[in-house]
Image (cartoon, rainbow, N blue to C red):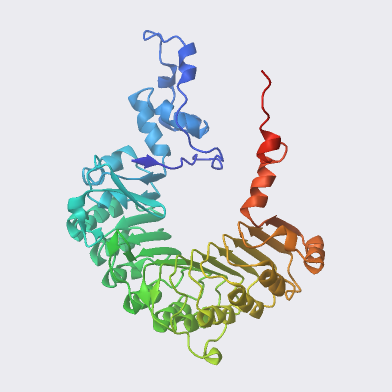
Amino acid sequence: MQLHFYPPLSSAPSTSPPSEPDLTSFHSFSFDPSAPDYTSLLSDELLLNILSKLPISQHVSNSLVCKRWLHLHGRLVYSLKVADWSFVTSGRVFTRFPNLTDLDLVLSCIQMPKSSGIIVTHKTMSVHVDTHFILDGFLEETALLPSNAVDQGLRMIAGKYPNLQRLAATGASEEGLLRIAEECPTLQELELHCCGDLALRGIAGIKNLQVVKLMGFIGVFYNSTISDIGLTLLAQGCRRLVKLELCGCEGSYDGIKAIGQCCQMLEELTLSEHRMDGGWLAGLSFCGNLKTLRLRSCKSIDKSPGADEHLGSCLTLEELHLQGCQIRDKQSVKALFLVCENVRDIVLHDCWGLEDDVFSLASICRRVKLLSLEGCSLLTIRGLELVVLSWKELQRLRVMSCNNIKDTEVTPELATLFSVLKELIWRPDSRSLLSSNLAGTGMGRKGDRFFKRSKD
């Protein structure tokens, strides 16, 4: 069980980061069991108001004072990550934390021995695994809670937390999600792991849903499928979506088109490790309010984008982010920049295959104001110069850990551009980064100068 934040009842949330309780200060106090407990004269509401104004770092230690303070501390917790499913089914979570608005059940839905010394990590998720629970490289069905058990827990949660605003779960089905839709009208954010197309029918009744994250086919963990059917059900049922993230999802032009036509408030779309069919890029032209497009860890952008004249353009798009993507295919990269031709910010981090001729296609976007490059080791100063000099509105440039770009190769034209930029972060290669970090330390010199032989 992990607690995340504890918003006070009548004041703005503290900006102090959560930390372990500092118990060292207790050594300076003498404890007298016979002394009267003056806090017993205070009502629960008054004491709760006092405790809510204390720093977050003291909340855990305060809860250890007595049973009453422990109970009151639970009323201050609004966000919880559950690791043990029995904590939900036994009802203890509802007694201990009656005011939760943010509940994460993802890890508790995976039945793995916590004593196992094997930990598998994927992005931000880590799970203890056992060789008996792995089948063909994925978590076996017996390692996940049955859907009916998850649905039973969701029914309990729906009845106890009508003010729930965020929920994350694994293996939920249509029945459990329908109950959440009926009982939790304030739910705004939903994260579903290992769910299929038909389960998405259950979220159609969540009228105020604004943020959705779907985890389908995820290597080592899940082998579920979300296709155009699921994307269409999602689009038709959640028309107020503002932010959508699809991880390991299948689909095509039809699914993206349905999302664009139905979710007219959608502003941010993220595709991670997508398995989309060729031609899906053209569907982005139907996203009339999209402002940010993110592609993460994608093995390809679009296998078959089609003719340029049929792609269309996403006119409102302002930001394009690519991280850990393979962008060797010129045709798909060109199609991406054509769809995003009005973009203002381009961020390329750790992208494989970004050579000069591939990066030159970015000149299709004529209104770029910010370019951020990091970990793009194939790009040279020549390829960078040809593109950035063509952008007349460029104001910010960030180049970090691009080892093939050398300081010594900067041309006078590029130096002139640097002088007029509003922001310039220039640490292109590891050697220049190391030199800047070692400046003034005396390290990094040649051995015959730095290491001097001591005199006997």
**What residue appears at the point 67 percent right and 27 percent down from the top-left corner?**
453
For the residue pair 286 and 389, the one nearer the viewer reads as: 389
User: How many numbered markers are drawn?
Assistant: 0
Report whether residue 321 is seen.
yes
**What residue appears at the point 73 percent right and 76 percent down from the top-left corner?**
390
Which residue ends up furthest to the front in the rendered image? Answer: 456
Tell me where residue 87 appears, x and y as whole percent.
Answer: 25, 42
Report whether residue 443 is seen.
no
Tell me where residue 430 appears, x and y as whole percent.
Answer: 62, 52
Q: Which quarter shows the C terminus?
A: top right
Q: Is residue 77 above or below residue 411?
A: above
Q: Is residue 170 above or below residue 67?
A: below
Find residue 221 and report its image quarter.
bottom left
For the residue pair 156 and 38, the one nearer the viewer reads as: 156
**What residue appears at the point 80 percent right and 69 percent down from the top-left corner?**
413
Tell me where residue 441 appears, x and y as whole percent.
Answer: 69, 35
